[in-house]
Amino acid sequence: MANAKRLEVVFWLGTLLPFVLTPNYLSLASQIAITALFALSLDLILGYAGIVSLGHAAFFGVGAYAAGLIAKHYWTEPLSGLLIAGILAGLLGYALSHIVVRFRHLALIMLTMGFGLLLAEAANSAHDLTGGADGLQGFRVPGLLGFKFDMFGKTAYAYSLGLLFLCFLICRRIIHSPFGLALKGIRENAIRMPAIGAPSLSHLRKAYTMAAVMAGLAGAALTHTTSTVSLDVLSFGRSADVLVILILGGAGRLYGGLIGAIIYMVARDQFSGVNPQYWYFWIGLLLVAVVMFLPNGILGGLSRFLKPKN
Amino acid sequence: MLSSLAGVLFDGFAYGMLLFLLSVGLSVTLGMMNFVNLAHCTFAAVGGYCTVSLVNRLGWPFLAALPMAFLAGALASVVLERILFRRLYRASDLDQCLVTIGIAFMSIATFAWFYTTEPQSTRPPAYLLGSIELMGRSFGVYRLFLAAMGLAITALLVYSLEYTRFGARVRAAVDNQRMARGLGIDVDRAFLFTFALGGGLAGLGGALAIEVIGLESTLPLSVILVYVLIVVAVGGLGSIRGSLVAAIVLGITDTAGKYYFPWLGAFLIYLVMVALLMWRPLGLFGKR
């Protein structure tokens, strides 16, 4: 246990390295931190509560558009915008959670996908509000607490990383609480858990809402650091990507989404420039290989490799 | 508005027939093995590209290429089933989703490699183009052809599933797999044949769809996949009648929506789907 904690400290110290080692890649690092936060939020419902979602980008997109609209029409102070975006995404998540937690299997997959597509179509149609396919432009978030968002992305990375770290601590606390244990129990057997005093549906609703808030925060952070919102934040592709990232890293182990985001984003940055249309071949192959041979993702494989005796 | 109604209904019906061809295989395999196959539209793309190659590069007549598209789709589905999918029948639906999405990703890149990302097209023969006058209205010949093909294949499917020994085995396996095994029915074999049939029909649908929706390398994960999934989920797993009804309703709704309310986009479709699924999670004609 102490060993694991030391590793955790090393990991988080390592996230500071890009400031020193790769100052030219700080905007990429910021994107990675945001994606990691998004994957972490999916981990909460998929890895721990067992809710399969193919439409998680809905909350990411709501957060992104909320932050963008606030910055464009009202004020450009990011922290309050972040908060409001998170609350809005959470409200949507809470509303949808009443429906989502009642379904399983294909109906669940189709419903989550359906809600995601609905929102994407709505944003596309509401051209006056969202800018439609052109995206929401014409605003600029100048800075955070006196630090400017510049083209090198120093402030952007600090902002995204700080947000990720904070949310990670909260997630870690949730997972290790009795509530988190109950979630795992529900994942394994949703019918038996109420018998020992953990109401399945209301627990799942809470987890779903928390995940929605976190996804909304990630979306808002993307808006603040890039000063633009495109329709892509709500797309089905984003929902699928984050699922792939989480599975690659390993679902249900907190760091899975983080490791997955680092590997996926760095690989995409390096390889997709050469021939973008073939990039998905390797992602597909990796996905098939991970599911067939590494059921718990890269982290699961690593931990089995490191502890062969147990 | 009323005068265009017949045209919209007809075009929607033809489009629905196309959706039915593309989705009926998925519905039966999902109902039989509970296997969530998000790579189903890959078979359609295989059929489509097979047709493009045969017609454009080798100069085959369009109608002769259609059976080959069927065979290509069937072959692709059998190969995938034998190598990969059969190991996943007992896996969780998440794992099934992920592997089949992975397959779809790989197929998209592969099609882009061989055929570029440009949309491909092929001209059907002249006698399938243009329109004819019937009772004072003009109907597109190709749509008539689509509708006729769809009806003929539906009749063939219903016959082979309702009145043949093969069909009896498949229906038994869908209804109660364990009981069917107990009665000595080789469920795996029946399933392989069904899978091939479904893949083949998707391939044929993909070939017929070139003229209507075009053919791009992204077809396996395009909006067509969403429509196919809607047909399957709304119609009910393993129900051919359900798929047929859902496909026709979806085809007509989509065509009418594009004609009368173009600003809504696909919003209406998704809304109806979500509402229907909340009302009946197992689909309109689903049993389990």
Image (cartoon, coloured by chain):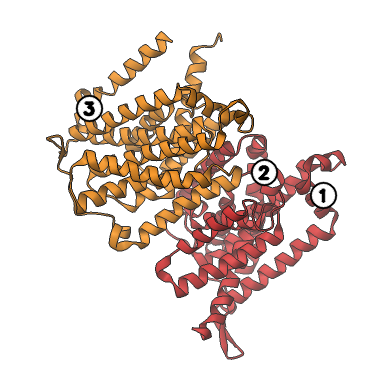
Chain colours: A orange, B red
Q: Which residue in the structure is indicated by mark 2? A: B34
Residue A81 position within the rendered picture, expressed as x and y whole percent measured from the top left: 24, 43
**Dot 2 and dot 3 within a common chain:** no
Tag in front: 1 or 2:
2
**Dot 1 and dot 2 within a common chain:** yes
Q: Which residue in the structure is indicated by mark 1? A: B169
Separation of marks 1 and 3 at Cα, in angstroms: 63 Å
Q: Name the residue type under label 2.
A: Asn
Residue B14 position within the rendered picture, expressed as x and y whole percent measured from the top left: 60, 71
Front-most of residues B52 and A230:
A230
Query: What is the secondary structure assignment of the residue under circle 1?
Result: helix
Q: Name the residue type under label 3.
A: Thr
Provide the chain ID for the residue under circle 1: B
Q: Which residue in the structure is indicated by mark 3? A: A22
Residue at (54% x, 11% y) in the render: A308
Residue B4 position within the rendered picture, expressed as x and y whole percent measured from the top left: 51, 82
The answer to the question of whether label 2 and label 3 lie on touching residues, with beta carbons closer than 8 A, is no
Task: Look at the picture and state if A21 lies above or below A211.
Answer: above
Q: Is residue B14 visible?
A: yes
Separation of marks 1 and 2 at Cα, in angstroms: 17 Å
